[in-house]
Image (cartoon, helix red, strand yellow):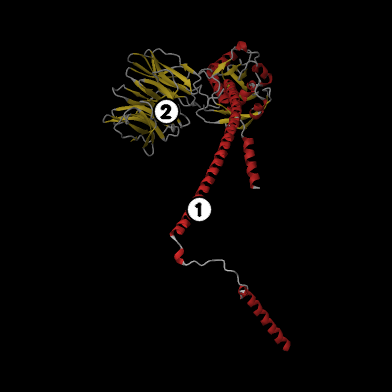
């Protein structure tokens, strides 16, 4: 009896041993998307679909199908035929229609289809003014992006950066994510540094040398009102807002030794969190506002450390390479992006907090100041070409690399805003 | 009373008779001729002792020789047996080699087909952008010997709908897995009639 049971067990084991083939790389090709001109018979529809197409292809995540290749121009679910798009090997199709309500107000209905699976994956509508076409296109783009990828859309987020158009002119600028609609927040003949967004997108913190020494300012984006942090130290730098908007971490030098401090925005109190005689700088908050990453040379070369704010317990995070700096967390809190250097060559890299391995993702060699998109899928960083600074970026899977439109002057220290509501 | 007494007396006489038969040596009533000569002790000489000793020694040696001969015979037998065994072993190992060659041929062919299938599926699967998630989805494929995909279904979801959809999207673009065409039918039935594709988010 026992023998029979054992035989049955072995037999079932052999039956279960099916061939399993692992597929892990995926295609290098981008997903093909068709943005069909929205139908209303007027010129407006082309502008809207063009704007949506421009948004969705901004970071090279999709390949848009030219309109002259489209076999039909459906505007609603009823007249959408999957075979017309399957023939073109389209992965996703976006269609829609506009209805004029009154003089300048429009009602827009849109649909997104997963063509190979023959599924409608998004149906939505929006009402807006004709003058808000750009904003409307961003809203539709965000929703479409989320329906396709599962990630939050970032097309209405902003970039803050330092622009140095000529010697002794420094500007803090904010623009749309594609570099358009640039606005100057503050201009100075003294250096400006380290812009940082508050989590509600209402304020920007940065460092200004206008008084002859580095001081931290918080500027309200709508009113333009500026407020500096009163500290005892002569050198204050690297401000960064906590995600819960209650604190500002920064670097202050007392007796010539830079350490990490936290400024409580509610009670205006300052607390010190590192005391090592080495240089501690470039703090960055974890998504839950409980930990800070910072750069320190306490071991002999710049490396990344993690500080638990409540206990001041410090743990070294990077072990490889002679230079690791400017780290910040991904939205998941488990991975970080940093500048990783060896023998004078600096790349942007990513790393799991608990792993030793650093994955180098950028190919240019003088990369600095990486900033992660709020959905964690794109990294923008500053780099140089013949001493001219500009902003470049890439998607996390490495499929797409891009550069933002060059400005007149050198661009440094980009800071990506949080998601806009 | 008289009868009992008689019976008792009879019993006694019978038992005595038995006893007599068992204990008396009746050979005294039939004297045997004397065969042995009694030799006075002074006539047992040294040579006689030597003779006895030699005899004993010879007996011992003979026994040893016999034993050695026996051992030699047995050794020869063992060698013969081992020789035969060796021959058998060679045969066994040869048989095993042939089996291994057949197996490695199958293994080789299957591995080649697996590589081709991996290359093809990787070229059409558009992996969605996922922020450092380590997930996998498993899809069971049923094939006809012509390579035609008869059926596919998800046997283990990744838990992420976008990821699962991407795997279905990849398979919806192909009707035939031509990479299995031309392979030995036995190998196909064993390995590719039904197999699983495991799509992984991490390389």
Number of residues whose C-alpha sits closer than 10 Å to that of mark 2, classed few (under 14), some (14–19) or many (20 or more): many
Instruction: Please identify the residue farthest to the left as the structure is shown.
Output: A255
Q: Is residue A194 left or right of residue B78?
A: left
- Residue A229: tell me if it is visible: no
What secondary structure is marked by label 1? helix
The quarter holding residue B45 reads bottom left
* Residue B187 location (% of width, % of height): 64, 27
Q: Relative to A335, does residue A381 appear above or below in the rendering?
A: above
The residue to which callout 1 is attached is: B59
| Chain for numbered disc 1 | B
Q: Secondary structure at mark 2?
A: strand
Position of residue A289 in the picture relative to residue A191 (left or right) = right
Name the one closer to the observer, A19 or B9: B9
Q: Position of residue A218 (x, y in %)?
A: 38, 26
Per the rendering, the mark at residue A328 is 2
Q: Residue B52: x and y, percent?
A: 48, 57
User: In the displayed image of the protein, which residue is found farthest to the bottom?
Assistant: B1
Q: Position of residue A58 (x, y in %)?
A: 51, 17
Q: CA distance from mark 1 to mark 2?
A: 101 Å
| Foreground of the two, A99 or A75 | A75
> In this rendering, is residue A408 above or below A207?
above
| Whether residue A380 can be seen here | yes
Q: Residue at x 35, y 24 (%)?
A: A207
Tag 2 subunit: A
- Left or right of residue B2, residue A185 in this image: left
């Amino acid at each position: 009896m026992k023998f029979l049971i054992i035989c049955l067990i072995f037999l079932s084991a052999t039956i279960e041993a099916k061939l399993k083939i692992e597929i892990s790389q995926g295609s290098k090709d981008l997903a093909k998307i068709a943005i069909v001109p929205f139908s209303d018979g007027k010129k407006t529809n082309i502008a809207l679909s063009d704007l949506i197409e421009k948004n969705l292809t901004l970071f090279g995540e999709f390949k848009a199908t030219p309109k002259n290749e489209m076999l039909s121009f459906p505007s609603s679910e009823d007249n959408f035929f999957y075979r017309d798009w399957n023939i073109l090997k389209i992965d996703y199709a976006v269609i829609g229609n506009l209805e004029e309500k009154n003089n300048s107000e429009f009602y827009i209905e849109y649909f997104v289809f997963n063509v190979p699976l023959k599924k409608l994956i998004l149906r939505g509508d929006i009402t807006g003014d004709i003058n808000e076409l750009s904003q409307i296109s961003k809203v539709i783009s965000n929703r479409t992006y989320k329906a396709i990828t599962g990630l939050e859309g970032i097309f209405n987020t902003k970039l803050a950066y330092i622009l140095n158009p000529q010697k002794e002119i420094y500007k803090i600028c904010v623009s749309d994510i594609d570099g358009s609609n640039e606005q100057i927040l503050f201009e100075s003949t003294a250096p400006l540094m380290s812009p940082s967004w508050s989590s509600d997108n209402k304020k920007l913190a940065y460092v200004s040398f206008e008084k002859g020494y580095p001081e931290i300012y918080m500027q309200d984006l709508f009113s333009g009102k500026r407020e500096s942090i009163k500290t005892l130290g002569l050198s204050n730098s690297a401000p960064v807002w906590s995600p819960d908007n209650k604190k500002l971490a920064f670097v202050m030098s007392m007796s010539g030794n830079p350490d990490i401090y936290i400024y409580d925005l509610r009670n205006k109190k300052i607390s010190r969190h590192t005391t090592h005689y080495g240089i501690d700088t470039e703090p960055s908050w974890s998504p839950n506002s409980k930990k800070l990453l910072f750069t320190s040379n306490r071991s002999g070369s710049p490396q990344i450390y993690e500080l638990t704010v409540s206990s001041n317990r410090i743990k070294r995070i990077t072990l490889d390479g002679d230079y690791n700096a400017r780290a910040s967390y991904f939205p998941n809190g488990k991975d970080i992006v940093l500048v990783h250097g060896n023998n004078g060559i600096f790349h942007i890299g990513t790393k799991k907090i608990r792993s030793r391995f650093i994955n180098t993702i950028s190919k240019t060699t003088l990369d600095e100041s990486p900033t992660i998109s709020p959905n964690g899928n794109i990294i923008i960083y500053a780099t140089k070409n013949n001493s001219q600074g500009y902003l470049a970026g890439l998607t996390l899977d490495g499929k797409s690399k891009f550069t933002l439109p060059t400005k007149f002057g050198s661009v440094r220290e980009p800071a990506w805003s949080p998601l806009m509501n | 009373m008289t009868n009992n007494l008689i019976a008792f007396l009879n019993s006694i006489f019978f038992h005595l008779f038995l006893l007599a038969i068992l204990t008396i040596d009746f050979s005294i009533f039939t004297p045997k001729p004397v065969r042995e000569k009694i030799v006075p002790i002074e006539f047992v000489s040294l040579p006689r002792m030597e003779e006895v000793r030699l005899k004993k020694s010879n007996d011992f040696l003979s026994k040893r020789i016999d034993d050695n001969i026996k051992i030699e015979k047995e050794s020869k037998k063992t060698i013969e047996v081992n020789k035969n065994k060796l021959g058998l072993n060679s045969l066994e190992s040869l048989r095993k080699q042939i089996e291994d060659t057949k197996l490695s041929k199958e293994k080789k062919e299957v591995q080649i087909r697996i590589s081709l299938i991996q290359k093809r599926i990787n070229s059409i699967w558009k992996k969605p952008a996922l922020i450092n998630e380590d997930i996998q989805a498993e899809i069971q494929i049923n094939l006809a010997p012509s390579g035609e995909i008869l059926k596919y279904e998800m046997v283990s979801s990744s838990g992420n709908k976008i990821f699962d959809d991407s795997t279905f999207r990849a398979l919806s673009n192909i009707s035939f897995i031509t990479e299995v065409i031309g392979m030995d039918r036995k190998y196909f039935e064993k390995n590719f009639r039904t197999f699983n594709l495991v799509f992984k988010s991490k390389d």
